[in-house]
Image (cartoon, helix red, strand yellow):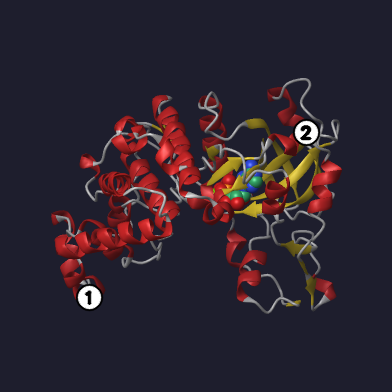
Amino acid sequence: MNVIEDNSCALVPPCFFIEDESFQDSLDLYQRGYLHPVAISDIIRPDPSTSASRSQDAPSGYRILHKLGEGGEATVWLAQEVDRLDRAVALKIFSAHCSSAAEHEARALKACMASQNVLSLLDDFTFTGPNGAHKVHITEVIMPLKKLYSLLPACAKKQVATDLARGLAHVHRCGFIHGDIHIGNIGCAMPPAFTENTIALTMSLLDRYDATMVILRDPALRSCSLPPYLLDPCDILRVYRYYRGLKARQDAKLLDFGNARRVGEEDADVVRWMCPPPEAAFAYYGCGGLEILPTTKGDIWCLGALMLRLFTNEAILYDSTSIILIQQAELEGVIPPAWRAFWDRNEILRSNTDQVTPEKAEAGWSRRRDQFLQKNPEVDLAEADLLIALMRRMLATNPDVRPSIDEVLAHPWFAEDKANWS
Ligand SMILES: Nc1ncnc2c1ncn2[C@@H]1O[C@H](COP(=O)(O)OP(=O)(O)O)[C@@H](O)[C@H]1O
Ligand SMILES: [Mg+2]
């Protein structure tokens, strides 16, 4: 169980500059039991108690250089080892209430590290700050796919899809389920020049800091739980371009294993889905908030949804209401029999029944195929058809009829000569 402290609904007092609601939402996460307030150039050192589990030559600490990103469980920073200043790493600081997610992630990353399509975990420890004890994961720096994919030609997107399918096959073979595959949880390896060049050169490319100062209107309320400012993520794409990452072969990796489980494991922890597959969405919305654990077949659906985004730019909307079920059923054009009673009782779903027909689904897929071909004239029709056929199988509403990851990799679209796409 995740422990959420009593003061979880306490709001941060009003600040100058922060009129925007999204800033306020971010700031409300800086309180006891939640995010650690980070300032650039802070040094994060492991608590002495965690030293026992780390190797003797593990760095004594990491200095924060810039922000890389944030998600539902953590903030992620560009950092350098304090004992080896030439080494740039990513430092993920989990919210204090997400230590079980951190444990899921560390366990899965350690078990699956033999694949180059899974993020490498370099170090992990706990440290204590004003908001509590935080798990920290040190990993290689990657280029987030979300900021990259629209710049890639179809052949590079196919490399990304191949890498991810291989990475997922490895994860499943190791007995794990990723449990939260979506575009925000994928990255591509930084080009070799990123590690070969000095951190000073990289930092000269990241000299902009887009910060919103956190200054409480009432100085008496100052609190060490709050960061001195809220920072936007750095322009890592600039670094990726500069080191010629766009010209190189993309080397895609699965990251964020905070939801990962062992196959068949019973576990009462909260499952935080960004992109729930239909069976999880129906359990939640159609069966009174029922939480189901991630499965390998759920991973296949999520990888299918990710490929849809990659190749057609179409995002399946993750509306946090039962409306999500309409879009999921539309992909196949059938309302699953098990959903029917709930569907007919729910006014919004019922009023959209006409949208969910096999004819409309067929028309939707042929529109996607045509748009894809229009944008990628170098891809031939037969191969586009194979890709669409594969995505449709992966996005089947019924998990039992989805292919396994080995079947996905054996599909003719993956086996097809890549030369067609270059
Ligand atoms: N190793 C990394 N290198 C660069 N950016 C990263 C790295 N890990 C995560 N990020 C960025 O930070 C975001 C949040 O990280 P993630 O591991 O998904 O955390 P959460 O569990 O909170 O979702 C990602 O979407 C990505 O943009
Ligand atoms: Mg994430």
Q: Which residue is mark 2?
A: 196
Nearest the eye: 74 or 113:
113
Q: Are marks 1 and 2 in contact (CB under 8 Å)?
A: no
For the point 74% across and 37% down, which residue is it? 193
Identify whether 285 is placed above or below 412.
below
Residue 421 or residue 222, whichever sits in front: 421
- Assign a secondary structure to mark 2: helix
Residue drawn where x is 80% and y is 37% of the image: 197
Q: Quadrant of residue 356?
A: bottom left
Q: Position of residue 167 (x, y in %)?
A: 46, 33
**Amino acid type at mark 2:** Glu
Could you tell me residue 175's position as x and y percent?
A: 40, 27
Q: In whole angstroms, how far apart are the C-alphas of marks 1 and 2?
A: 59 Å
**41, above or below 16, in the image:** above
Residue 268 appears in view: no
Whether residue 354 is visible, yes or no, is yes
Question: Is residue 411 left or right of 59 when viewed as pictured?
Answer: left
Answer with left or right where residue 316 lies relative to residue 126. Answer: left
The local secondary structure at tag 1 comes to helix
- Residue 49: quarter of image: top right
**Mark 2: is the Cβ under 8 angstroms from ligand 1?**
no
* Disc 1: CA contacts within 10 A as few (<14), some (14-19) or many (>=20): few
Report the side of 60 relative to 148 (left or right). Answer: right
Q: Give the residue displayed 17% in from the left and 55% down from the top.
A: 336
Kind of residue at badge 1: Glu
Which residue is identified by label 1? 347
Is residue 61 found left or right of 326 in the rendered image? right
State which mark lies toward you, 1 or 2: 2
